[in-house]
């Protein structure tokens, strides 16, 4: 009798655990990157060059990774949400476009063009310019300013 | 001889002037937004993207949009993972692209503020598939900028994106896509 009860009890516990886990997974929000360690640390211009010279191998290396990018602030675009910071060399049209996480909003107010900063974000890919007019960009989202 | 050189200079400077005037004919953005919504019986799937590249040639009416699939942001992490891994397979197909044409381009006075209807026709490439897309959008000319807006629907099955049988009942095959881009004149 008590064995039967233990088995039933065990099954109930397992079902509850699975349900709780499923519920947790279902409602899990995208994680903020503030406390996540970067997989790579790299300079903005070096990162752009890696993608320009070989997009495929750079994609293999960086896609789905968290990267800390150090570079000069080329442009600050306020827009929907927290806006975008563009890092890179002003003499070149290409840049690293960092879409900011909503948590990074406060820090952008004091930010100025030409400042040297480090931004941590998730690499979403390389937008190659075929027109020759716009410059090619490495794109990141969920970005936070770390330094 | 002298006369001919002068004539050459005149026609050359005329050419340069018209070239610099027509430099304003292209408009672009790198921070356009695209969002999509798919309303199923149980599950509503929605996401937005804030780094859409768009180029519009006001002379020919040619428009081009490019987007990196991994840049779509979802509220729910699991949805974002499933979208990338199981549905659009963004590792394999990292980009989506639209190339098209404003059919009624002559109706749009790009130099004059106002709201214009734009009938857009073109090809959307996503998940390795290319399909014809057609929709009515709006172009609002304001202080030299173009505020563009368009809404259209696609079917996931058209792009070989299959919904697993387990969740087929809960999800919709129809996706409504909204495009909002503010285009600046391209200075060259």
Image: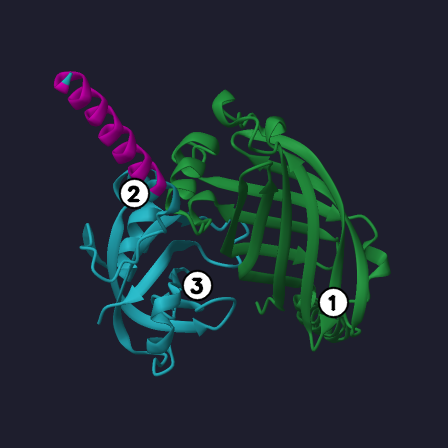
Residue placed most toward the observer, B41 or B36:
B41
B4 left or right of A9 in image: right
Mark 3 touching mark 2, by CB under 8 A? no
Q: Residue furthest left?
A: A2
Name the residue beneath numbered marker 1: B140
Is the residue at mark 1 from the same chain as the one at mark 3?
no
- Residue B17 image-quadrant placement: bottom right
Chain (cyan):
A
Residue B7 visible in rendering: yes
The residue at the point 19 percent across, 50 percent down is A39
**Chief secondary structure of the magenta span?**
helix
Q: Secondary structure at mark 2?
A: helix
The quadrant in which the N terminus of chain B is found is: bottom right
Q: Residue furthest front?
A: A1
Q: Residues within 10 Å of mark 2 (few under 14, many from 20)?
A: some
Q: Residue furthest bottom?
A: A110
Q: Secondary structure at mark 1?
A: strand
What is the spatial separation of the Cα atoms under label 3 and label 2, in whole angstroms? 20 Å
Mark 2 touching mark 1, by CB under 8 A? no
Name the residue beneath numbered marker 2: A58
Give the extent of the magenta segment: A2-23
What is the spatial separation of the Cα atoms under label 2 and label 1, in whole angstroms? 39 Å
Q: Residues within 10 Å of mark 3 (few under 14, many from 20)?
A: some
Is B174 above or below relative to B167? Answer: below
Q: Position of residue A13 (x, y in %)?
A: 23, 31
The residue at the point 81 percent across, 48 percent down is B103
Is the residue at mark 3 from the same chain as the one at mark 2?
yes
Q: Residue A74 got which mark? A: none
Name the residue beneath numbered marker 3: A93
């Amino acid at each position: 009798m008590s064995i039967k009860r233990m088995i039933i009890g065990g099954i109930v516990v397992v079902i509850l655990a699975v349900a709780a886990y499923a519920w947790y997974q279902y409602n899990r929000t995208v994680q903020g990157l503030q406390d996540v360690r970067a997989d790579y640390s790299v300079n903005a211009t070096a990162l752009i060059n890696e993608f320009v010279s070989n997009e495929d191998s750079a994609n293999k290396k960086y896609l789905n990774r968290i990267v800390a990018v150090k570079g000069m602030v080329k442009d600050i675009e306020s827009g929907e949400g927290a806006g975008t910071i563009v890092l890179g060399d002003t003499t070149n049209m290409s840049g690293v476009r960092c879409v900011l996480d909503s948590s990074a909003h406060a820090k952008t107010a004091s930010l100025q063009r030409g400042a040297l900063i480090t931004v941590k974000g998730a690499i979403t890919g390389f937008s190659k310019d075929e027109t020759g007019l716009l410059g090619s960009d490495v794109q990141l989202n969920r970005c936070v300013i770390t330094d | 001889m002298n006369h001919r050189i002068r004539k050459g200079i005149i026609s050359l400077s005329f050419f340069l002037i018209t070239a610099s005037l027509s430099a304003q004919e292209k408009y672009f953005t790198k921070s356009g937004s695209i969002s999509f919504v798919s309303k199923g019986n149980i599950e509503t799937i929605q996401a937005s993207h804030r780094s859409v590249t768009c180029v519009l040639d006001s002379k020919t009416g040619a428009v081009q949009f490019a987007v990196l699939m991994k840049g779509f942001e979802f509220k729910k992490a699991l949805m974002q993972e499933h979208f990338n891994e199981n549905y659009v397979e963004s590792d394999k197909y990292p980009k989506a692209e639209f190339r098209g044409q404003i059919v009624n381009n002559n109706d749009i006075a790009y130099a004059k503020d106002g709201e214009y209807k734009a009938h857009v026709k073109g090809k959307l490439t996503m998940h390795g598939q290319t399909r014809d897309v057609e929709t009515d959008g709006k172009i609002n000319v304001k202080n030299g900028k173009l505020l563009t807006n368009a809404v259209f629907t696609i079917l996931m099955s058209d792009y070989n994106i299959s919904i697993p049988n387990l969740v087929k009942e809960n999800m919709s095959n129809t996706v409504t896509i909204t495009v909002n881009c503010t285009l600046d004149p391209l200075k060259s």
